[in-house]
Image (tube, rainbow, N blue to C red):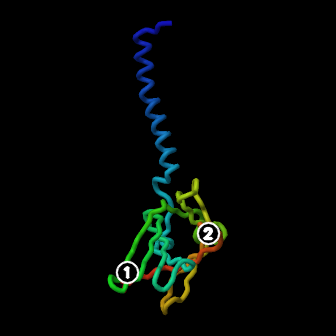
Amino acid sequence: MKSSRTERRARARLAVPFAAVVLTANGCAVMHRLNVGVLPRPTVLAAEWIDLRHTTPGDTMLWVLRDDGYDGAARLVADPAAGERRSETRYGSWYFDGDLADSTHRAICFSKRIGRNGATCLAFSLDTVSADGAARRRLIVRGYRGQHYTGDRELIERISSSSP
C-alpha cells in the first residue's frame, strides 16, 4: 500500500523526536553501566591507603582512592640512589553506598576491576589508630577477594612525606 506524501512527512516528523528519546535513554543506560556521573564519594575515604598485607620496609603497596572516583594501586620502592620510585596502575572507579554513620549498612564499591564483572561492594570499618607517633585513619575492608587471598584487608592512611 502506497502512502501519501503528507503521511510520509508526518511519520518523518515523529521519527526525529522518537529517535532522540531512544538515544537519550540508551545514553543514560550506558552512562549508568560505566558509572559516569555523580556518585557518592565521601572525602573521609579518599586517600592513599597503605596495604599492610603487601608492604615491607622497602616496598610499600598503596590503594589509591581519589575524590574524583579514581581507583588504583601504587607501589613505592625505596631506592638508595634515587630516593623513592613510584609506579601506579588504574583499576577503575570507586563509590560509596549506604550511610557513613551506620556501620552495618555501608559499603565501598569498586565499579570495575580486572577479572570482575559489575560492581563489587564490600562492608568496611573506619577508625583512627596511632602509627609512627601520629594519629592515622584505618580502613578495614571486609571480605576482600584478592588474587591469592580472601579476607579482611587492613589499610592505614598514608601521610605524604611532603605534608607538614
Up the image or down, 138 lies above or below 146; here it is below
Q: Nearer the viewer, residue 57 or 120?
A: 57
Q: What residue type is labelled 2?
A: His
| SS for dot 1 | strand
Q: Where is residue 139 in the image (x, y as percent from the top left)?
A: 56, 76
Is residue 106 shown to the viewer in this render? no
Using the image, determine if residue 143 lies above or below residue 83. Answer: above
Mark 2 or 1 closer to N-term?
Answer: 1
Q: Nearer the viewer, residue 164 or 132?
A: 132
Residue 75 quadrant: bottom left
**Foreground residue, 157 or 145?**
145
- Secondary structure under tag 2 reads loop
Q: Dots 2 and 1: beta carbons under 8 Å?
A: no
Residue drawn at 49 percent across, 65 percent down? 41
**Neighbour tally class for label 1: few under 14, some 14-19, many 20 plus, Cα within 10 Å:** few
Tell me how far mark 2 sits from mark 1, CA to CA.
27 Å
Q: Mark 2 points at which residue?
A: 148
The residue at 45%/72% (across/down) is 74
Mark 2: few/some/many CA within 10 Å (<14, 14-19, 20+): few
Q: Where is residue 27 in the image (x, y as percent from the top left)?
A: 46, 42
Left or right: residue 103 compared with residue 113: right
Whether 106 is drawn above or below 33: the answer is: below
Residue 145 location (% of width, % of height): 62, 66
Find residue 123 and report its image quarter: bottom right
Farthest residue, direction front: 81
Residue pointed to by mark 1: 84
State the residue at coordinates (45%, 36%): 23
